[in-house]
Amino acid sequence: NAGVTQTPKFQVLKTGQSMTLQCAQDMNHNSMYWYRQDPGMGLRLIYYSASEGTTDKGEVPNGYNVSRLNKREFSLRLESAAPSQTSVYFCASSDPTSGGARAKNIQYFGAGTRLSVL
Amino acid sequence: DAKTTQPNSMESNEEEPVHLPCNHSTISGTDYIHWYRQLPSQGPEYVIHGLTSNVNNRMASLAIAEDRKSSTLILHRATLRDAAVYYCILRPTSGTYKYIFGTGTRLKVLA
């Protein structure tokens, strides 16, 4: 019962390099999210996908792109990494449109990707 | 988006109850109150949520003020494994998929 799986767990990049963070969920959820968490801070929403085929910007989308590849997978791409993007990245999923009240309100998070940009 | 205010940190002795407060004075009538916690080096995990009435589950209890401008997460018997950052979040009942995380309350449990 994997839940939300993120790869890689750790990554070090040089300024200007590109990379894609992968996220997959096996709970048949419609909605998926990408957050970043800087040291000592709460999570900030980068992008989200309410359902397959749709994506929308969150609080801090600049410097990122996303792809909702299918219902299971939601990737985050850094085209030209900058030191300011050093952070821990979390993917989450939820299904706000089905199930009971409890099920509708829960977001499930992955273990995170720790990214350093030098 | 309505925001929440929490103390930066709290301490509790093991096996004692813990009351974690949250102020949300700009809450609207359609906002659910959610609590998540984040253990060290892990992603957040759901704890509990409520709308108007107090709620209990196996992890905790949620007490909601009558005017809904504040709430309290209650851990009945804190254990060392409850040491985490606890986030209080408001989520509208429909039309949005966004959570606004604040900085949360870091709970330290003393043995």
Image: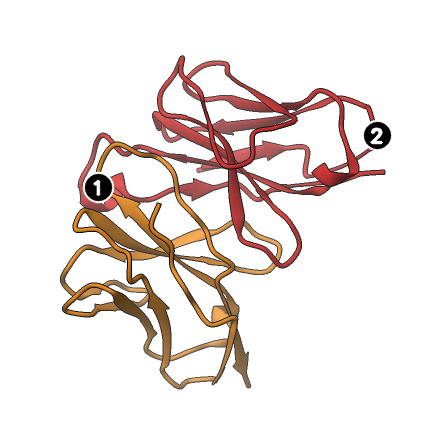
Chain colours: A red, B orange
**Relative vertical location of residue A66 with respect to residue B8 in this rendering, above or below:** above
| Location of residue A51 in the rendering, given as x and y in whole percent from the top left corner | 35, 21
Which amino acid lies under the numbered mark 1 shown in the image of this protein? Thr
| Location of residue A67 in the rendering, given as x and y in whole percent from the top left corner | 53, 17
Q: Give whichever of A87, B24 is nearer the camera.
A: B24
Q: Which residue is mark 1?
A: B93
Q: Chain letter for mark 1, please.
A: B
Q: CA distance from mark 1 to mark 2?
A: 41 Å
Locate the C terminus of chain B by quadrant. Answer: bottom right
Q: Residues within 10 Å of mark 1 (few under 14, many from 20)?
A: some
Q: Which residue is mark 2?
A: A15
| Location of residue A60 in the rendering, given as x and y in whole percent from the top left corner | 56, 35
- Residue furthest front as drawn: B26
Image quadrant in which you'd find residue B3:
bottom left
Image quadrant in which you'd find residue B95:
top left
| Location of residue A14 in the rendering, given as x and y in whole percent from the top left corner | 85, 31
